[in-house]
Amino acid sequence: MRPGKPIWRSLDEHEGDAAFMARVAEEFPGLARVLAEGPDRRQVLKLMGAGLALGLGGCDPGDPKGQIIPGIKAPPGIVPGVENEYATASVLDGYATGIRVRHQDGRPMQVVGNPDHPASLGAADPIAQARILSLYDPDRSHGATKRNQPAGWDAFLAAFEQRRAGIAARKGEGLNILTGTVTSPTLGAQLARLQQLYPQMRWHQWQAINRDVVRQGAMLAYGRPVEAVYHLDRADVILAIDSDLLSAAPGHLRHARDFAGRRNPVAGSMSRLYAVESTPDLTGILADHRIVAGPREIHEILTALAAAILRHGALEPNTPAWIAPAIADLEAHAGGALIHIGPDQPAEYHALVHALNEALGGRGKTFDLIEPVEANPIDQAASLRTLIADMAGGRVQDLLILGENPAFTAPAAFAEALKQVPFSVSLGLEPDETAELATWHLPEAHPLEAWSDARAHDGTVTILQPQVLPLFGGHSAHEILALLAGDGAPDGYKIVRETWSKLDDAAWHRSLASGVIAGTAGKPSDGRLLQIGGPTLPAPTDRPITLLLRPDPYLWDGRFANSAWLQELPRPLTKLVWDNPLLIAPALATQLGVGNGDLVKLSAGGKVLTVPVWVQPGQAPDCVTAYRGFGRRQIGAVGKNAGFDFLPLGDGPLSIEKASGVYALATTEHHNPLDAAPEGVVRHGTAVAFAANPKFLQSPDPQASLYPPQPTGDTAWGMSIDLNACIGCNACVTACQAENNVPVVGKDEVLREREMHWLRIDRYYEGPAEAPRVLLQPMLCMHCEEAPCEVVCPVGATMHDAEGLNVMVYNRCVGTRFCSNNCPYKVRRFNYFAFARDEVRSIQSRNQEVSVRARGVMEKCSFCLQRIAAARIDADKEDRAIRDGEVVTACQAACPTQAISFGNIRDRASAVAKRKASPLAYALLDEINTKPRVTYEGRIRNANPAIAEDSV
Amino acid sequence: MTGGFDPSANLITKATLFGFLFVLLAGMGWWFLASRTDYANSVGWVLDQPVPFSHEHHVSGLGLDCRFCHTSVEVSATAGMPATETCMTCHSQIWTSAKLLEPVRVSFLQHQPIVWNRVNALPDYVYFNHSIHIAKGVGCESCHGEVGKMALTQKAQTFEMQFCVSCHRDPGPNLRPREAIFDTDWHRTAATPSPAALMAQYHLGTRSLTDCSICHR
């Protein structure tokens, strides 16, 4: 490999900050600092000897204690010790992604993907996986409250029945229902029936992260709110403008899989992705060309595209140099080209993109149009404005808010107006800001506790079936609406079954078992473009600084703020946890004279906020990004004091100035560095270099070794990770945390570099800080054949088994941490405190197949040993070998792009053996002869030869 | 000139030194050996149960197979404890007024489970799977002792790691022909296949069973 541009992980490293480099080099960071602060002897012993003390005292006496409590009747379908899986869906903002829930001994304990569902093909994103934690969240609402005092369901029923009589008498005058986006056929049908029952009733829809512009763009282009379904596997050239195609758009898991299938040059012809971004996001990570663009630049790009593709005219003279070759690329691949624009750009831009895609001949090939998946597509912003005006004007008598939290997510006018409503009911999972202001708050049945249905991005319907009876006596929105219709004893099952009465019992059970109702995918629409030339583009508002208010990738609009897993999941690009500083460009940081963690004063429309900043490489210089979902005011123990609420700033012109003070920001970007040159660690190159010599990323022949070769057996477990497919979504990290009972440690411990994630995604930047390229590398225990950690353990707690696994025996570990000291990959995690014991988490939510580690014990990736053992036992009982694909690690299963491949490398025909035979395959730090069982396929960039090298 | 010490000081010093040595050795001996006694491991000790269930009567007397109650032993990691309903399949018709069986009837009628005290237990960090042992020819009695002769249930083995590892190192002598696994009267005769033959029959011997990862996760 030729020495390329510098590769770095954090700006302090890039700038060569000496103090920072010294701190990063410490093996046990923070220890020296604590010692320097004048420790007392007790504290030192606590820090250094905790594990030792436990080890000496903890011999098991062998005294059998405990009780066995069998049931009264053996429950049908449950064999103790044998797991079950039931299909349902995770619904976010109305759109469903099919999932399955694993049950152990009759209780749900993990969300995994549903391979039969078209929106995910078996993957599960972090939000879906974290639903299991929110199911058991002790901070959920436990009962109906009236004006924040416990009242009880029966009291509510009585009060509601009185109101309903009044509503019926007035024919629904003054009755307003607020929901989010509704795709549920059942909910849509119920609301339609209610509209007939109470003709004056008003149904409002509004959610914080709404897709109004997508709808309006389709209206402008086609006259109907059609929805687009993308086929990225058929796209040879993709232009993504401020796009959420791979990160959050409905169907993003499917998009990621289809897209990644075209990214490995060994597998076939590579696609090319141009990503235009104002703030770095997942779509830009795998882009072949990433263009940093603010609102002005995006306007310029779309104008150029319209001029060239729609009107076949010439481009303006000042157009950036990359645009003409990109347009030529798109046109050369007409029929295999796709342009996508994100939900934060104006509706006219969306309409123009529709016209461009039609002109490029993608209809029926790279995208299809279907009739809207939503039950009732409307302009949600207008709907909310009407509702607020009605509430303030006293025209709302009865208000039902189903599953939304507008007192936090909507502008402050809503919370003010809500106080005017005489009878309001908020149905929600937790006692949130809206519950505090409403007359009644009812606990909502968790999505995993209730019957419902929902549609995926392509229209496919999934029936949501409850995995457990409501733990806290919650009720679903369906049941509340049934109450409103006069049904005194609503039953969610009956309501949903009735919607699907056309399915006979056999078809119903098939749909429940598979998680999809066959034949419900949306039919292609015959919509025609209204205006072939596209609309005129409005000029961008001229502002020195634009505030980009985006949903946090994991907390979304704040509804998941009490989820410990999601709070501690390092964000893909910033690697920040537990906080949402303002992201600013390096140029703006220099101008203001601030660095990471410095406070700034943000003023807009009379509101002033003092927040920390984070300098984000690759951010557009005239844009600052603020993530929503933090700064919740009424939230449980986990989400308290986490982050800042930027919503009060509003839309007006923004000004920033440096304020005094610093704020500690916890980020994992500089944690666990490898002591090696990054070029050899995260190997990458261009498609041209690959074509010239496919093996150009591989090291020269390995050196002779003094070690005896590993004994061969039938089974040798190994893993291959394709860096061309990793989009950095962190689904694997969450899956590993769920599967292996990995504890959450909290912000203070993350600041001390003690996060416990067994699997981490290292993020490297390459190039200048203003517009770097991003390289990702998932890091987990390499299960080295010559493991440096095994030889240094004084008590033999980590050893190598006959199948190649580096095994960690928790009960032997005394906590010397010599093993993590010796690990060159820094993948071992140590329980400095009793993290697992101190986590506020119900024991039922844990995986009983994996030990929960005590304090003072080292842990690390085990290649899902519990899954290997289960497969081995099943295979032995049936007297056969383990089949390829029978053992799927948690990370492998959750990955949307199938970047991880795992299996028996002795089996030449296995998928993993084929991936390891790829010319791009290399082992990490192979020069130190650890012989890791985890190898990577280097990343190839398919650059457009007509674009100047390194210009974008 | 004589020293300031009394002649008895010689004896006292020697006695003290030997005494310390004795206490040290005794203490180490106690520390090492006490936890390995049957008492410390509850071997042979009967635990109080809500119902004094007699395996001797039900198994040797009536001839019930182990699997009648412990139903999941061939398919699951845990052998399973019978639900109250299992007891009531017979005891709704026989001994219906027995005072000893009052807790069973109360459990069934009031929907309250019977809380048994666990006799055979392994620490949480040991993941034992019954079904694979049954599939590979280990009889119930090999680990649980002659349950068919126990009037009240006791633990038969210490279940120290040594007990498991000694068999894992050489399973042959502890295996039975498949039809004898649940047989409470079986013992090795001249007609029984040799340990090596049994190992071959069950396809054992190819994999190392003494890796830590076999039992510990």
Image (cartoon, rainbow, N blue to C red):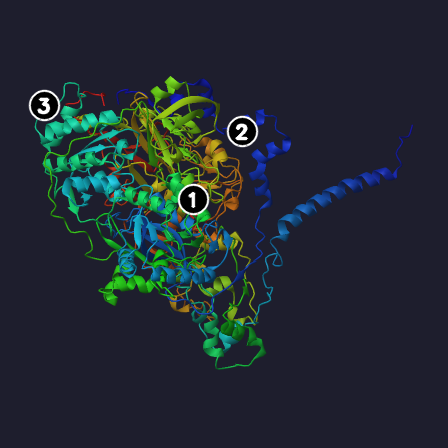
Q: Which residue is mark 3?
A: A314
Q: Is residue A279 left or right of residue B116?
A: left
Marks 1 and 2, the one that precedes in the sequence: 2
Residue A804 in view, yes or no: yes
Residue at image coords 10%, 43%: A528
Say which chain tag 1 marks.
A
B165, A264: nearer the viewer = A264
A292 vs A476: above or below: above
Say which chain tag 3 marks.
A
Q: Is residue B16 left or right of residue A248?
A: right
Q: Is label 3 in contact with label 1 (beta carbons under 8 Å)?
A: no
Location of residue A342 in the rendering, given as x and y in whole percent from the top left corner:
25, 36
Location of residue A586 in the rendering, given as x and y in whole percent from the top left corner:
35, 21
Q: Which mark is residue A31?
A: 2
Outermost residue, left direction?
A312
Q: Work out which quarter of the rendered image holds the C terminus of chain A and state it.
A: top left
A530, A14: nearer the viewer = A530
Please state which amino acid type lies under the numbered disc 3: Ala
Q: Which residue is mark 1?
A: A563
SS category of the residue bearing label 3: loop
Outermost residue, right direction?
B1
Residue at image coords 29%, 23%: A771
Q: Are marks 1 and 2 on the same chain?
A: yes
Q: Are marks 3 and 1 on the same chain?
A: yes
SS category of the residue bearing label 1: loop
Between tags 3 and 2, which lies in front?
3
Alpha-carbon span between mark 3 and mark 2:
63 Å
Q: Is label 1 in contact with label 2 (beta carbons under 8 Å)?
A: no
Marks 3 and 2, the one that precedes in the sequence: 2
A184 vs A207: above or below: below
Quadrant of residue A328 in the image?
Answer: top left
